[in-house]
Amino acid sequence: MPSRTETPSRGTVVPLTPDTAPMLWQRLERHAVPERWRTVDRSAHGPRIVAVPDGDGEDWTGAALVTARPHTAYLKIVDAVGDVRAAAVAVVAHARDQGLAQVKWEGWTVSAEDAAAAGFTPLNPPLTPVGAAEPASAYVRWLHGDAVSEPPYYGQTTHFTCGAVTALVAAAHAGTVPRAALDRESELSLWRRATNFPACEPVGLGVAARRAWPSVPVTVHRDVDRPVLLDHCSEDEREWRALFQRMSRTQAEDLGVPVDPRHLSTATIRSTVDRGEHVLLLISLAGMQGFDVPHWVLCHGAVPGALVIEDPWAATSAGDTWADAHLLPVADAALDTMAAVPPDPFRGAVTLGRPPRSA
């Protein structure tokens, strides 16, 4: 987040903090500022106002509330007021100045016509119901190169089914299963087959994916040869959960699922997704959300300087929504840091290849 007021081409950028908020509300008082600008605590996502000064600089003709998850490569317009098209242009210029890959625009108040005029295209709405804390629609503008192929967005319906959801979304994006098959029953069914109670560790998730889609090549990547994701458990619980993990390793051998002990680099992930394959990547949420919880995301695309992921979870209480989590670009180095899962860091992933073509 900028530490001071900045003036990129065509706009003025001011961080939205407790100290700056009174001045900003005063500058914006002639515009119909939505109440959500004031009532949601977005401080974890670097909120700022990007404003368009008038000719003499005494007034703002348009302004946008902008946020982004930390350690990512995009900006999100929550809303724009006044001359919304000019405000969006200023946000895009600000994003370009920062070398970012993308700008999104939540659809709370913007019309499809205004979004299109500013170069934004609509995102497909989530397959899961959208609550009051999230917009029903959203838009995206890529800043470098062509748009990335869009998987369906499905938000996990429990706190622990992220692994199953990422696998299902990957299968739907690849055409292995129809998008209509992504529902709560399929989510919980795949989780039940993959779980180490309640988390999905890499080998168990890989085994479940192979059994669900036998024609899809599956490779597990895990750079340690020990039980994982058990640090929160008591000694007794660790013993039987570790047994399950050893059973999963045996099942992987029986099914012909290789377990690669090498670090899966972001360069390898980039080449994998460029081939149209998918990587289920285990990360820590400490960087993006501020709490150290292991979490599965789907790597499915690449743009200059960033890999594109699907995150099945959003922190709606902080103003984070499906629009943040969907088609989310993360710089390669930042994603590699997230993929070292504490407390005794290890790396885990599952690669889903493309099924062989029928003769």
Image (spheres, rainbow, N blue to C red):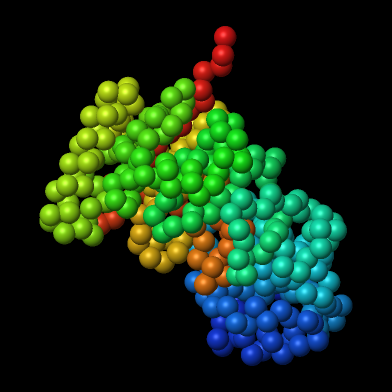
Q: Where is residue 147 in the image (x, y as percent from the top left)?
A: 69, 42
Image quadrant in which you'd find residue 217: top left
Residue 275 against residue 104 in the figure, above or below: above
Q: State whether residue 110 is above or below residue 229.
A: below
Front-most of 324 and 200?
200
The quadrant of the image that shows the N terminus is bottom right
Q: Percent x, y for residue 98? A: 61, 59
Does the image show residue 356?
yes
Front one among 199 and 119: 199
Please report the residue visible at 34 percent of the width from the left and 26 percent of the height from the top. Answer: 257
The residue depicted at 61 percent of the width and 50 percent of the height is 127
Work out which residue is located at the far top of the displayed protein and give it. Answer: 359
Left or right: 203, with 66 as reference point? left
Report the residue at 69% width, 51% height from top: 123
Residue at horizontal 62 percent and vertical 61 percent from the top: 130
Residue 73 against residue 319 in the figure, above or below = above
Instruction: State which quadrant residue 9 falls in.
Output: bottom right
Is any atom of residue 341 visible in this view? no
List x then y, in percent, for residue 172: 57, 37
Q: Quadrant of the C terminus?
A: top right
